[in-house]
């Protein structure tokens, strides 16, 4: 830990990411609640969730840019643009011009800009820390981020109740500008790939690099793991869309803040514990983790009262935090560095592609029936995942992350 914290670039990357995470927590809660407040409909909450997540489906298009562009400039540019975009919401509110249509217009542009920043964070980390410290660095990143999320998710509910949802967007804009200043101080700037710079203006080279990333992943176990996560994220997106109405029915914005804070707290605990279970077989972890989450999600709407509901969500989300750290570390330690930006963006697109679809479906179903229906559906999806992995000998027997290699995951530049 001390060795990592002495690394100037890591500290700048870490603090910059934390600043963004703090604002993102307030923003994500504010968007969903403001959509519900402006319309009173879970359907529009689902639309807001769809527009927030939909651009992640094309994140793979940004992978080659991350591999060839100056990463420091990517960070500075994206943080500045996002800060300006977020300010539109409070300015519109001050001018008494805020409507659901302005909110829905800002969301996808902001999310699209973020698709360039996210793979940049993931691609730069293995270049600023040693491979021996990679899992610890990822755990520290995720643990601190989830801790920030837990605090600010809970705080957002209180702020909404006291000063209103639009105040959250002003704070969010400030965090983007703080992150921009911190990340501009990085000494690390350019990608390691030497041959990519020479083709930076060639469209044919760009599309060739995208194909190279897909070819590298074709037939791999990484794609199978991503497919499982994609299936799960459909249900997760549906629950996110149903959550504001469900929380409102059991306590209003304060309950919403409590539940979202609990979700982040569970992920925080899981991320914190990831480094302690790095010696556990990855396949076994998937089985136990998915089963635990399935039980927790279903109990969240079976048990009465906000306290028991929050406790069940806490249990359900612990495995999710650990899964995120272990899976990211697995890819960062195994994948060829020259392809890392593309691989991370492709897999992230696969993970997230169904979240916006789930948000639309979840918003519609919640508006027509009841939000708790989506919790039962998500629990069922996790059970299906457990059965699939249990019946898949190769996935079930995957060793610990540190023992994996490209051949074991069927990754090859010759595909």
Image (spheres, rainbow, N blue to C red):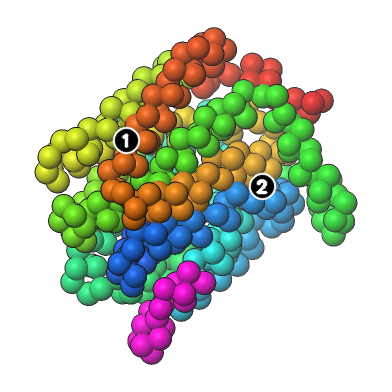
Q: Is residue 91 magenta?
A: yes
Pointer 1 with pointer 2, Cβ within 8 A = no
Which residue bears the numbered disc 2? 60
Tell me where residue 344 sits by quadrant.
Answer: top right
How crowded pointer 2 is (Cα within 10 Å; few <14, some 14-19, many 20+) is rated as: many
Left or right: 154, with 340 as reference point: left
Q: Is residue 390 magenta?
A: no
Is residue 81 shown above or below 396? Answer: below
How crowded pointer 1 is (Cα within 10 Å; few <14, some 14-19, many 20+) is rated as: many
Query: Looking at the image, is mark 1 or mark 2 earlier in the sequence?
Result: 2
Rendered location of residue 259, percent (x, y): 24, 48
Rendered location of residue 335, percent (x, y): 65, 31
Q: CA distance from mark 1 to mark 2?
A: 31 Å
Residue at point 22% right, 32% down? 299
Is residue 14 shown above or below 131? Answer: below
Query: Which quadrant holds the N terminus?
Result: top left
Is residue 280 shown above or below 198? Answer: above
**Residue 296 tag number:** none
Can residue 87 be seen here? The reply is no
Rendered location of residue 404, percent (x, y): 58, 19
**In the rendered structure, which segment of residues is drawn in magenta?**
89-105
Left or right: 311, with 166 as reference point: left
Can residue 218 be seen here? The reply is yes
Which residue bears the numbered disc 1? 376
Tell me the element at label 1: helix
Rendered location of residue 265, percent (x, y): 27, 43
Q: Main secondary structure of the magenta part?
A: helix
Furthest toward the front, the residue is: 368
Residue at point 64% right, 63% down? 73
């Amino acid at each position: 830990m001390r060795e990592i914290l002495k690394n100037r670039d890591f500290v700048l990357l870490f603090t910059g990411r934390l600043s963004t995470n703090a604002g993102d927590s307030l923003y994500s809660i504010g968007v969903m609640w403001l959509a519900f407040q402006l319309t009173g409909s879970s359907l529009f909450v689902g639309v807001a969730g769809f527009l927030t997540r939909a651009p992640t489906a094309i994140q793979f298009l940004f992978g080659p840019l991350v591999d060839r562009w100056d990463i420091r400039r990517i960070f500075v540019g994206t943080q500045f643009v996002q800060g300006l975009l977020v300010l539109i919401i409070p300015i519109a509110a001050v001018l008494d011009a805020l409507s659901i249509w302005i909110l829905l217009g800002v969301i996808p542009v902001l999310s699209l800009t973020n698709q360039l920043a996210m793979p940049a964070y993931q691609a730069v980390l293995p270049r600023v820390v040693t491979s021996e410290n990679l899992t610890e660095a990822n755990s520290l990143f995720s643990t601190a981020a989830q801790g920030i999320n837990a605090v600010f998710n809970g705080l957002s509910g209180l702020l909404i109740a006291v000063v209103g949802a639009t105040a959250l967007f002003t704070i969010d804009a400030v965090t983007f500008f703080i992150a921009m200043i911190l990340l501009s101080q990085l000494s690390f700037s350019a990608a390691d790939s030497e041959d990519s710079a020479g083709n930076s203006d060639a469209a044919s080279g760009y599309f060739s690099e995208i194909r190279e990333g897909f070819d590298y992943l074709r037939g791999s176990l990484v794609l199978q793991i991503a497919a499982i996560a994609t299936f799960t994220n459909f249900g997760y997106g549906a629950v996110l869309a149903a959550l504001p109405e469900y929380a409102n029915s059991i306590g209003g914005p304060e309950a919403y803040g409590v539940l979202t804070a609990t979700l982040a707290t569970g992920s925080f605990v899981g991320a914190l514990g990831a480094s302690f279970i790095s010696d556990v077989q990855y396949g076994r972890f998937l089985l136990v983790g998915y089963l635990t989450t399935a039980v927790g999600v279903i109990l969240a709407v079976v048990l009465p009262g906000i306290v028991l509901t929050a406790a069940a969500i806490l249990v359900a989300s612990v495995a999710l935090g650990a899964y995120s750290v272990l899976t990211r570390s697995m890819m960062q330690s195994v994948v060829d560095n020259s392809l890392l930006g593309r691989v991370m963006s492709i897999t992230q697109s696969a993970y997230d592609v169904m979240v916006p679809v789930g948000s639309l479906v979840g918003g519609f179903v919640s508006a027509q029936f009841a939000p708790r229906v989506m919790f039962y559906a998500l629990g069922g999806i996790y059970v299906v995942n457990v059965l699939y992995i249990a019946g898949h000998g190769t996935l079930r027997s995957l060793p610990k992350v540190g023992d994996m290699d490209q051949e074991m995951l069927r990754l090859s530049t010759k595909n």
